[in-house]
Image (cartoon, grey):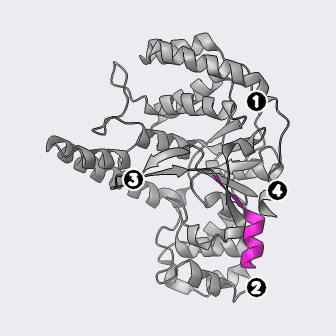
Amino acid sequence: MGVNLKELIPQQAKSEIDIKYLRGNPIALDAYNILYQFLAAIRQYDGTPLMDAQGNVTSHLSGLFYRTINFIEEGLKPIYVFDGKPPEMKRREIEDRISRRRQYTEKYVKAKSEGRLYEAKKYAQASSELNNYMVEEAKRLLTHMGIPWVQAPADGEAQAAHMTMKGDAYATGSQDYDSLLFGSPKLVRNLAITGRRKLPNREEYIEIRPEIISLDEMLVALNISREQLIVIGLMLGTDFNPDGIKGYGPKTALKYVKGFKDPIKAIESLGDRWQGADPIKIFNYFSNPPSTDDYKIEWGEADERSIVEMLVHEHNFNEDRVRKGLERLRKSFKGSIKQKQSRLDEWFK
């Protein structure tokens, strides 16, 4: 779920961009976030995911392979960052997600059996589950493609933010706003869903473009510190305290936090309204999350034989399509990956 900061982000702190303006820049991508998007979006008309002859789901591999090729063709330098062990305080959110997926799975089966295929697909998308074997296959495919990936000790977005703050990545890439609480200087959204998309429950389409958000510009415009932003996030509700504080929306939370110079005092003054959560512990987690410097970021040429073996022979992908994808990857790799890193600072001036 993540924290919802959408209404709080000032216009001057965000910009829609053409993906080409990210050319030459390393982007630390929240791998779980992106893989879930592929699992939800890449399905047949009745909601059934792509599967191989053995019944194994392959939607995540299809999305990862072809979208990563698109990234390389556009000149991006993707780095996929995978979640590690979630902290204990995320247990409730994880259990809630499992429960919601079960409910949507039941609704999907019922809608499909009754021929309500449009509804069935919606329920199927909401029931998407990313399991360990899918994650390991994704890592294996990226290795074969010559694309770097990093194993986070805990939260992938926290690790991506750490890499961006170090300068190893230009920005983090995720749909969630948690990256900003973790301190990422820049967040890019919509990378995995860029293009023409149908509006839910309507026969209309919109063009989705990448959006880049500057944390510094946001904090300056709101006249708050990152620590105060974290408190606002806690009040709105995060994966570690989904309930937040009842009665506070983005604007009222912002006004409240501005009344305190010390963010800890702002937290403590809300007393038992935190409904069982330990807000100080969560605040400290966002302020200084587990991260690692034990990683290597290198882009190499693809091992085409291994990719064909994995996708075509193991998972029954269409060989002609895979080889055409590999040809695109081969042609674009040398020029795009070695492009000099560009800068996007002018978007926020």
Mark 4 lies on residue: 345
Tally the numbered discs. Answer: 4
What's the residue type where badge 2 is placed?
Lys
Q: Residue 273: x percent and y percent?
A: 50, 83
Label whose residue precedes the other's in the sequence (1 or 4)? 1
Residue 272 seen in render? yes
Which sits in the foreground, 78 or 236?
78
Callout in the foreground (1, 2): 1
Q: Is residue 259 magenta?
A: no
Residue 59: image quadrant is top left
Tell us which disc is closer to us: 2 or 3: 3
Residue at 70 percent across and 19 percent down: it is 331
Q: Position of residue 238 (x, y in %)?
A: 54, 65
What residue range appears in magenta?
A: 211-226
**Which three-letter amino acid code belongs to the residue tagged 3?**
Glu
Residue under pointer 3: 204
Badge 2 is on which residue? 261
Q: Which mark is residue 21?
A: none
Could you say which disc has been placed on residue 336 in the image?
Answer: 1
Q: CA distance from mark 2 to mark 3?
A: 47 Å
Q: Amino acid at mark 1?
A: Ser
Q: Position of residue 42 (x, y in %)?
A: 42, 36
Query: Which of the marked residues, 3 or 1, is nearer the chain's N terminus?
Result: 3
